[in-house]
Image: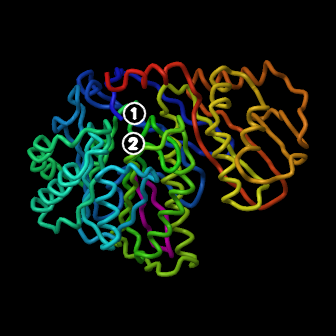
Amino acid sequence: MYLCLPHYVSIKFPAFHSSKMDFKLRAISMSATEAANHVPAAPISLPQGPWKQVAGGVTAAEGFKAAGLYGGLRAKGDKPDLALVTCDVDAISAGSFTTNVVAAAPVLYCKSILNTSKTARAVLINAGQANAATGDAGYQDVIESASSLAKLLQIRPEEVLIESTGVIGQRIKKEALLNSLPNLVKSLSPATKGADDAAVAITTTDLVSKSVAIQSQVGGTNIRVGGMAKGSGMIHPNMATMLGVVTTDAVVSSDVWRKMVQISVNRSFNQITVDGDTSTNDTVIALASGLSGSTKISTFNSNEAVQLQACLDVVMQGLAKSIAWDGEGATCLIEVTVTGAGSEAEAAKIARSVASSSLVKAAVYGRDPNWGRIAAAAGYAGISFDQTKLRVLLGDTLLMDGGEPQSFDRDAASAYLRKAGEIHGTVVINVAVGDGPGHGQAWGCDLSYDYVKINAEYTT
């Protein structure tokens, strides 16, 4: 999605608030000219664990380069609109895509490539045109773009994957894209700047860019996992209006990698919602260079696989939460945690139902601690549970227990919601539905008047 929104030179972002999390906020500094063409970096929240946050985003892992520049594809302004991520070697590839049957040309292209190849070398992303509902001509544009880039990189066309975001029904501005490719390739860099430029270039209505990387160990060897994503509106599982690229230098087989990526997507991007709309272009591409020299992961149940899965989860969830935090018109992030379900899948479905509820989202924006809306959304999730075991907390305030409402300080609960909105913080909702082992989370944002304003005039 694209909309020309004002960006300011000085913007203060709070870290997400949660007693169980350790949060990092990356400081930025830019001139007035830079601020007009770029967006600041999102606050990325990561839980505590056997990893440390590092700079570099998609280029943090060994073997990756990135670039982002303005190619003239956007309808207005000169913010960067072309991004490229490459790998020095054949990277094990995986992808996850929209479930919308009106899938964009680049989605169809990537799915076709991944069905026939286990590796890739490059991901090209454009902002401005979604190239969705553009017929055979739009698909041919994708093929020509991939072929032209492959020639410049001296790789095979089938080693290039394509992602697009922008207005549905509009083909890529192919001439502008093709003319920009030589400079884009020349701009490739393994440095953090390359990753940051790429993360900005894929944004549309986003008010912040989303990029994060961590270092951890797999089998006693240091590995890195990094990623970037975009998304602000048209966000609803599966996945969201979002594009993403995730990279690692861990050594992993194709079958295991693809399974890991889908699990992480299910725990992250498939658990965020802003407005209930599922995009035509949702794509996450994940590449593994294997250049860390770590032990090769060939079985999904090994200790090394568990370690890498945890790293993938934390990176994708950090990016997913930043998308929900940046929801169009949002004043706060909503984090819903469900416990006591029969399985992780059941808990995740209930959490997603609560986070997706327009009534819950509107109540949060109105600073109304309306526990009935939370209970109702949990109840219509399609998962059976004993309502006499239903428990609902808003922050630290117990609203419902044993399926019955509790006496609580309404003013204090409203103040909790109000404070979250004032600082663009996090509203935490905890729901228990029984005594089972299932635990799941989902993230959304409040629903404000500004969301309607932004989307009512989207193409005009």
- Residue at image x 35%, y 64%? 287
Residue 280 lies in the magenta-colored region: no
For mark 2, does the 10 Å Cα neighbourhood hold few (<14), some (14 to 19), or many (20 or more) residues? many
Q: What residue type is labelled 2?
A: Lys
Q: Which of 157 and 245 is in front in this view?
A: 157
Residue 228 in sight here: no
Residue at image position (42%, 22%) is: 456
Front residue of 350/339: it is: 350
State the mark number for residue 457.
none
Give the CA separation, mark 1 to mark 2.
7 Å
Residue 208 makes an appearance in the image: yes
Q: In this view, does 296 lie to the left or right of 140?
A: right
Q: Which mark is residue 206?
A: 1
The residue segment tinted magenta is 213-228
Q: Name the residue under label 2.
A: 230
Q: How crowded is mark 1: few (under 14 residues within 10 Å), some or many (20 or more)?
A: many
**Quadrant housing residue 438:** bottom right
Where residue 143 appears, x then y in whole percent?
Answer: 18, 58
Quarter of the image that includes the N terminus: top left
